[in-house]
Image (spheres, rainbow, N blue to C red):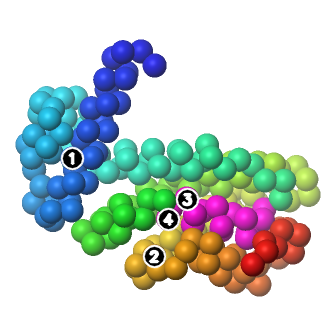
Amino acid sequence: MRGHERLKEQSKKMIEDALLELMGEKEFASITISEIAKRADVARRTFYRLYRKKEDVLSGYLEKLCLDYKERYGALSRYDVLRISMDFFEFWYGHREVLLLLHRRGLDEMVYGEIGRSSLDVVRNRMAGGMGKGMGKAEELEYFAVYSAGGFANLLRRWVDEGMRGTPEEYGREVGNALGQFLLPEVISFGQAKLSD
């Protein structure tokens, strides 16, 4: 990474951290750009070179998290709902404090809108290994990817609403087992990938 890009990324991280710290202290609506810049120890013009508004900071932060998820979990040979469920909730549990903070500040729509949009790419990526192996046409897989992305985003929202109690393994297994009861066996390899208790 070149020096200019590295400085840009450092500034973004400092601004993200500053905004999250401020959100721990006060409502999102009452936080100003000046406060964020001061807390981040950057000039206001630096903020405006990187973002148009404070909502863009959170959107960019969530987008990076979703990209991290996509890069961490690769394609599966079959759509294994239990494995996907376990991976998904384990990943987001690692960002529990931020998700709960955003929930407390009433930013659920922003959070799950971004996760839903990004999750579509994640689902496509995970399903890529099953493309062309009797799983259906590309258009059918696209419909299933949209359905799956929205469903998992809403399941995450439900877990956050409940305070993310329990471990991600417990919640992932519970969700995976429940979904496995309703999804067609031709679509998933649920029975082949049971995880041990």
Residue at horizontal 37 percent and vertical 44 percent from the top: 60
Q: Which residue is mark 4?
A: 93
In the image, what residue type sits under mark 3? Phe
Pointer 3: residues within 10 angstroms few (<14), some, or many (20+)? some
Residue at horizontal 35 percent and vertical 69 percent from the top: 100
Say which mark, if any, is on residue 164: 2
Q: Residue furthest right?
A: 134
Q: Are marks 4 and 3 in contact (CB under 8 Å)?
A: yes
Could you tell me which secondary element the residue under label 2 belongs to? loop
Give the residues in magenta: 79-93
Report the Cα–Cα distance between label 1 and label 3.
23 Å
Residue at horizontal 59 percent and vertical 77 percent from the top: 171
Pinpoint residue 165: horizontal percent, then vertical percent: 47, 80
In the image, what residue type sits under mark 2? Met
14 relative position to 74: left or right: left
Residue at horizontal 71 percent and vertical 52 percent from the top: 126
82 relative position to 2: left or right: right
Report the Cα–Cα distance between label 1 and label 2.
24 Å
Pinpoint residue 86: horizontal percent, then vertical percent: 66, 67
Report the Cα–Cα distance between label 4 and label 1.
22 Å
Say which mark, if any, is on residue 18: 1
Q: Which residue is mark 3?
A: 91
